[in-house]
């Protein structure tokens, strides 16, 4: 199905702008194929605040955060996950302000690049400030350590890269996991959030409908993969060319990793077979019993 993305997004780089009574946003100038317009850094509260996803270690962006909040106190630095466009500015903010860094898992959580967390968060943990409370929601899939943060006072969900307005999330094994991603999307459907504020791009004003469209999109991709396997395609490059007809060839590499994530899920559930472990260079097939029933 066609996803109705939120493409309209008005902002100025490195300028702190009001989003709501309790939320402000400052966008880092790191646009790209995986970051959209750039990384959204959010400030929650007034006076004594939390900063969510400080973003990349761009001097101008870090300076803009510190200058904009010079008369306020940063009490918490929160990370949605450990990808490189979200956390590198955090140690610089910590050095400048003394605020501790929070991320999923135990203190000292190891990302692929650094050991950066002073405090670990688990699903359901809360942090409070003056007039606000944030709850951590573990949403693995895009990354195993991915957290969303819920601001109950305004029914806002800071959705990180789990749900974005400008694009679907990249699910790239081995850390990315399609089964976890789908479960995490279902987890959001039972919530009553009124709006999502993602780590890249515009706010999402109809979150339940939007999340359902993401679930249906992945289900359709999975069904198309099974159909092409039934037709005789056996490798991930063949499946990418057959299934991703709506995608530029320049993105086939990213699409291949998404198909790989689907193949891992399908092999683990017994719907697809391969020799050995699912990998990018494997050959895949439907089980013989499935082919007979077809």
Image (tube, grey):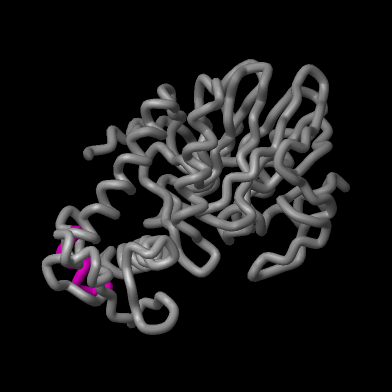
Residue at point 65% right, 55% down?
A: 87
Where, by quadrant of the figure, is residue 268 drawn?
Answer: bottom left
The answer to whether residue 113 is left or right of residue 277 is right
Task: Please count the marks in the image.
Answer: 0
The answer to whether residue 88 is left or right of residue 221 is right
Q: Residue 202's spot in the image, x, y percent?
A: 43, 33
Q: Residue 144's spot in the image, x, y percent?
A: 60, 57
Residue at point 55% right, 21% down?
A: 192
User: In which quadrant is the C terminus drawn?
Assistant: bottom left
Residue at point 44% right, 79% down?
A: 277
The answer to whether residue 90 is left or right of residue 294 is right
**Closer to the camera, 271 or 181?**
271
The segment highlighted magenta reads 236-244
User: Residue 237: within the magenta?
Assistant: yes
Q: Residue 53's spot in the image, x, y percent?
A: 64, 45
User: In which quadrant is the N terminus drawn?
Assistant: top left
Magenta region, main secondary structure: helix
Q: Is residue 123 visible?
A: yes
Does 127 sit above or below residue 247?
Answer: above
The answer to whether residue 187 is left or right of residue 256 is right
Where, by quadrant of the figure, is residue 240 drawn?
Answer: bottom left
**Closer to the camera, 33 or 61?**
33
Does 176 sit above or below residue 253?
Answer: above
User: Residue 238: within the magenta?
Assistant: yes
**Closer to the camera, 70 or 40?**
40
């Amino acid at each position: 199905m066609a996803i109705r993305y939120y493409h309209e997004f008005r902002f100025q780089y490195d300028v702190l702008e009001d989003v709501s009574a309790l939320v402000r946003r400052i966008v880092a100038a790191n646009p790209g194929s995986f970051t959209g317009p750039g990384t959204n850094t959010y400030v929650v509260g007034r006076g004594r605040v939390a900063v969510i996803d400080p973003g990349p270690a761009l001097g101008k962006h870090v300076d803009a955060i510190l200058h904009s909040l010079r008369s306020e106190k940063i009490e918490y630095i929160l990370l949605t996950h450990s990808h490189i466009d979200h956390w590198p500015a955090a140690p610089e903010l910590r050095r400048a302000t003394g605020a501790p860094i929070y991320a999923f898992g135990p203190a000292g959580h190891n990302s692929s690049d650094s050991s950066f967390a002073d405090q670990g968060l688990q699903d359901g943990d809360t942090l409070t400030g003056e007039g606000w409370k944030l709850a951590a929601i573990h949403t693995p899939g895009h990354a195993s350590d991915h957290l969303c943060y819920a601001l109950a006072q305004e029914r806002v969900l800071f959705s990180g890269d789990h749900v974005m307005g400008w694009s679907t999330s990249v699910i790239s094994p081995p850390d990315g996991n399609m089964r976890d991603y789908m479960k995490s999307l279902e987890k959001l459907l039972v919530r009553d959030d009124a709006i999502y504020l993602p780590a890249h791009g515009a706010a999402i004003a109809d979150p339940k409908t939007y999340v359902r469209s993401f679930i249906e999109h992945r289900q359709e991709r999975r069904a198309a993969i099974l159909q092409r396997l039934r037709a005789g395609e056996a490798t991930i490059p063949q499946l990418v060319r057959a299934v991703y007809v709506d995608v530029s060839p320049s993105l086939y590499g990213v699409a291949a990793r998404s198909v790989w994530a689907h193949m891992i899920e399908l092999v683990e559930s017994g719907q697809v077979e391969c020799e050995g472990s699912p990998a990018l260079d494997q050959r895949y097939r439907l089980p013989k019993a499935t082919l007979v029933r077809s």
